[in-house]
Image (cartoon, helix red, strand yellow):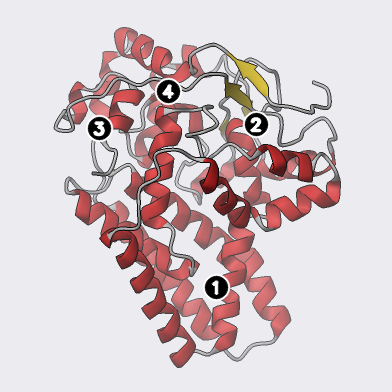
């Protein structure tokens, strides 16, 4: 690879739909993995409780103790809560959409920023229109990529304030859903939670939760996940990468990103089974073994910038499907993503 000044453009279809069909033809038993995992809700309860208890324990601690706890403990808890929100966005806990959205709002509480409902809407489009700049919020803005360039300080700023850069991407997206009752509920629940923490635990508890949030998605080895998923770190042909390292044990297998894009209707606990069932499709792909190594490589490697992404020249087209189509009848991730688009 070499230093880039623009994205990598492609006229090819994103790879996941085709691979999904091929895998289902050769390994139809993968269909048995499709379903819900209602026990994920207990993971949400445990993680929310963990963050609340730590905030309580740290309410009178020194600032150094708060920063250290946020970096070493809170970041991992909040990162896992992001994975829980992701599961809720794909409606992989319960059959009813409302139950999944309420679970996502619950998981969102310790993160202080009301984003669960909005994430669902933008993330489903990421699956349906991967690489389409006007619809895929996972792609950086062009000004964002030019601003950060490939300098060490710029990359540190980008990782540290990654959630803010994501907010700036919304203005370029088409087909944005308006503010509705679900978004309002998300904001109201977060406001009540913040007020309760401030009243009962004080400002230091809020600072702990705030730092945990920013560390979980930013200037932390966990932040390498955002680079791992779709940035071109090996070659210019493969646009999605998985991570098969030990941190999947505390990140609910979120590293299995190729597997997730191929089968977004399969819950987190069964993602490793996809690779075991069809190793001929996944072991031949490049993948990452360490988020920590990727974290430092991204910071110091001048050949890796925000322009190392594949962008499709024309708007993608995804056939609409009946919203009542059952999971077991879905044969592509595009139809699944469309079937789960919020109404």
Assign the N terminus to one quadrant of the image.
top right
Which residue position holds label 4? 276
- Judge depth for marks 2 and 3 and give the one in front: 3
Left or right: where 241 falls relative to 262: right
Which residue position holds label 3? 339
Q: Secondary structure at mark 2?
A: loop
Q: Secondary structure at mark 1?
A: helix
Callout 3 environment at 10 Å: few (<14), some (14 to 19), or many (20+)?
A: many
Query: Cα distance, mark 3 to mark 4?
Result: 27 Å
Which residue position holds label 1? 209
Measured along the vertical axis of the image, is residue 290 above or below residue 100? above
Query: Cα distance, mark 1 to mark 3?
Result: 35 Å
Measured along the vertical axis of the image, is residue 253 above or below residue 281? below
Could you tell me if residue 111 is visible in this image?
yes
Which residue position holds label 2? 231
Q: Secondary structure at mark 4?
A: helix
When asked about the image quadrant of residue 182, the answer is bottom left
Query: Cα distance, mark 4 to mark 2?
Result: 25 Å
Label 4 with label 1: CB-CB less than 8 Å: no
Q: Earlier in the sequence, mark 4 or mark 1?
A: 1
């Amino acid at each position: 690879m070499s230093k880039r000044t623009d994205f990598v453009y492609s006229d090819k279809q994103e790879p996941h739909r085709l691979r999904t069909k091929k895998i289902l033809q050769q390994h139809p038993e993968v269909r048995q993995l499709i379903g819900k995992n209602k026990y994920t809700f207990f993971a949400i309860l445990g993680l929310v409780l963990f963050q609340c208890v730590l905030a309580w324990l740290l309410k009178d601690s020194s600032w150094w103790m708060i920063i250290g706890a946020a970096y070493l403990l809170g970041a991992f808890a909040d990162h896992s809560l992001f994975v829980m929100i992701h599961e809720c966005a794909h409606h992989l806990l319960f059959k009813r959409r409302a139950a999944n959205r309420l679970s996502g709002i619950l998981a969102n509480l310790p993160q202080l920023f009301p984003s669960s409902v909005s994430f669902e809407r933008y993330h489903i489009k990421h699956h349906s229109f991967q690489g389409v700049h006007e619809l895929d919020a996972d792609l950086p803005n062009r000004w964002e990529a030019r601003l950060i360039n490939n300098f060490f300080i710029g990359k540190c700023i980008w990782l540290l304030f990654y959630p803010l850069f994501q907010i700036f991407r919304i203005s370029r997206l088409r087909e944005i859903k308006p503010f509705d009752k679900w978004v309002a509920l998300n904001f109201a629940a977060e406001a009540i939670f913040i007020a309760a923490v401030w009243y009962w635990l004080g400002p230091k508890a809020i600072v702990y939760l705030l730092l945990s949030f920013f560390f979980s998605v930013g200037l932390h080895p966990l932040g390498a996940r955002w680079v791992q998923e779709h940035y071109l770190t090996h070659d210019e042909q493969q646009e999605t990468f998985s991570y098969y390292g030990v941190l999947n044990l505390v990140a609910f297998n979120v590293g299995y990103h190729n597997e997730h894009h191929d089968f977004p209707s399969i819950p987190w606990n069964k993602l490793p089974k996809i690779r075991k069932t069809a190793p001929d499709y996944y072991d031949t792909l490049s993948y990452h073994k360490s988020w920590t190594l990727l974290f430092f490589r991204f910071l110091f490697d001048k050949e890796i910038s925000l322009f190392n992404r594949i962008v499709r020249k024309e708007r993608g087209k995804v056939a609409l499907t009946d919203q009542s189509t059952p999971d077991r009848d879905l044969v592509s991730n595009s139809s699944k993503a469309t079937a789960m688009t919020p109404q």
